[in-house]
Amino acid sequence: MVQNTALFLLDNGREVFVWQGWLPEGDSADNVVTGSATVRWNLERRLALETSLHYCQAKNPENPPKSYLISAGLEPASFTNLFPEWIQRDDIASLNIKEGRHPGEMLAVGEMLARLTRTHYTRAELTAGPLPPAGVDPSRLEAYLSDSEFEVRLVESAVLGPEVFEMTKEEFYNLPTWKQNNLKKSLSFY
């Protein structure tokens, strides 16, 4: 399947749509999706959403039009009806459905931008799959913990092992890289 990580902005006069393509599944040798591809895709999405909000504000500062994020294959009728001819792609829809999106879904750009710019997550959100949709760097999951959650000192369980880093982020990042990696592995942050 061809990768289409395109983003388009469409103003219909009443509202603004940000149409987002898709990331391929990465199940073949030709179609490998790495963590860095996802990080880049989320950065591009964030920039497109910011552009949309700036565009709406510039278009009408007193009453900016609403702006919505829609996904390829799952476009609402209010979007597809703007085109004289529309071909529904069920294969693309299934990719976006696997990502947790829904047919006809129109997400407010401001709300999605807040999700994509979130900087702190709980340990459970970071260690359970899939990663949060905020461009989280999979090689630095620990960086997204709040300072308090990072350094909370819990009694180690003989069965589970440590559940937190038991040091400040500064102390952690001053450790040699091999020690950092061993700690991250023991806490499922790798």
Image (tube, rainbow, N blue to C red):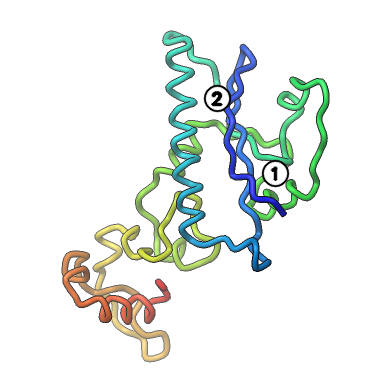
Q: Residue furthest front?
A: 30
Residue ID for mark 1: 102
Q: Is residue 104 above or below residue 182?
A: above
Of residues 133 and 84, which is closer to you in this image?
Answer: 84
Q: Residue at x 41, y 85 (%)?
A: 160
User: Which image quarter is the N terminus in?
Assistant: bottom right
Crowd band around label 1 with a 10 angstrom C-alpha radius: few (<14), some (14–19), many (20+)? some
Of residues 120 and 149, which is closer to you in this image?
Answer: 120
Quarter occupied by residue 18? top right
179 relative to 59 in the view: left or right: left
Q: What residue type is labelled 1?
A: His
Q: In this view, does 117 lie above or below 137?
A: above
Q: Where is residue 75 in the image (x, y as percent from the top left)?
A: 72, 34
Q: What residue type is labelled 2?
A: Ser
Crowd band around label 2 with a 10 angstrom C-alpha radius: few (<14), some (14–19), many (20+)? many
Which element carries disc 2, helix, strand or loop? strand
Residue ID for mark 2: 67
Marks 2 and 1, how far apart at CA: 18 Å
Q: In this view, does 151 lie above or below 70?
A: below
